[in-house]
Amino acid sequence: MRHIGVLALQGDFREHLTALARLGVCTTAVRSPAELSQLDGLVIPGGESTVIDRLARSYGLTDPLRELIASGVPVYGSCAGMIMLADRIENPAISATGRVQESFGGIDMTVRRNAFGRQVDSFESSLKFNGIELDAVFIRAPEAVQIGPTVQVLCSVPAQLPGFHDRIVAVRQGNLLATSFHPEVSGSNAIHEFFINMTRGDA
Ligand code: GLN
């Protein structure tokens, strides 16, 4: 049985644990470096990337997570998790002490936080992912505004205005997968199934 961890520092990790358990994988809520060993995959949930960054550092998880990502273990980041997997954040938060928000990195892309507006601008959209139609929920979602040559675009939403580019909302680079939206909220299994297949080497 596949064993998938969900980073459980902040955000909607419970919904991911439920979605994964429903699909028959063994799950662990990860809060310590020791819990990263023996995993076939890891999910970084949505939430607030500034808080995930801060808590990961105080739990001593930042470097172990960077090592896990670099080791090739499949990692999936949703929303704030997508921000955490980006090599570059276009508009990082800066704390009162002047510290600039950091990501774990891994995917050669620049993300813009809150690219679709604020909480009140949250929306649901029907998207095609891997040939499957799914309902995608966007909550203060990021967008990939620049991607490197090895990054594959899996989903984009059409530009609102003529002459503008479609907006990239799901990407893959090797064993790393990221979506701007929250599949664990809409009840659609397609993304989790795709990720589980990635951990098997089948996707
Ligand atoms: N805007 C949030 C951030 O910067 C992400 C929102 C979400 O995960 N729903 O982390």
Image (cartoon, grey):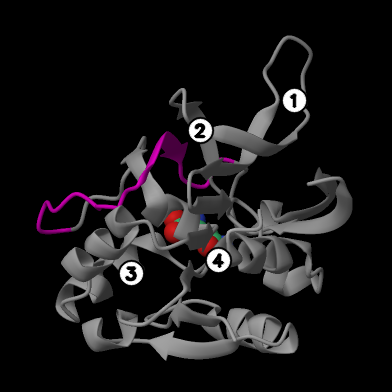
The answer to which of marks 2 and 4 sits earlier in the sequence is 2
Secondary structure mostly seen in magenta is loop
Which residue carries the number 3 mark?
51
The answer to which of marks 3 and 1 sits earlier in the sequence is 3
Name the residue type under label 3. Answer: Val
The answer to which of marks 3 and 4 sits earlier in the sequence is 3
Which residue carries the number 1 mark?
159
Give the mark toward the camera: 3 or 4: 4
Q: Is residue 151 left or right of residue 93?
A: right
Q: How far apart are the alpha carbons under marks 2 and 4?
A: 18 Å
Front residue of this view, candidates 25 and 177: 25
**Magenta segment boundaries in residue numbering:** 96-115
Q: What element carries label 4?
A: helix
Q: How far apart are the alpha carbons under marks 3 and 4?
A: 27 Å
At a point 63% along the width and 59% down the height, the residue shown is: 139
Q: Are marks 4 and 1 in contact (CB under 8 Å)?
A: no
Could you say which disc has been placed on residue 151 in the image? 2
Give the mark toward the camera: 4 or 1: 4
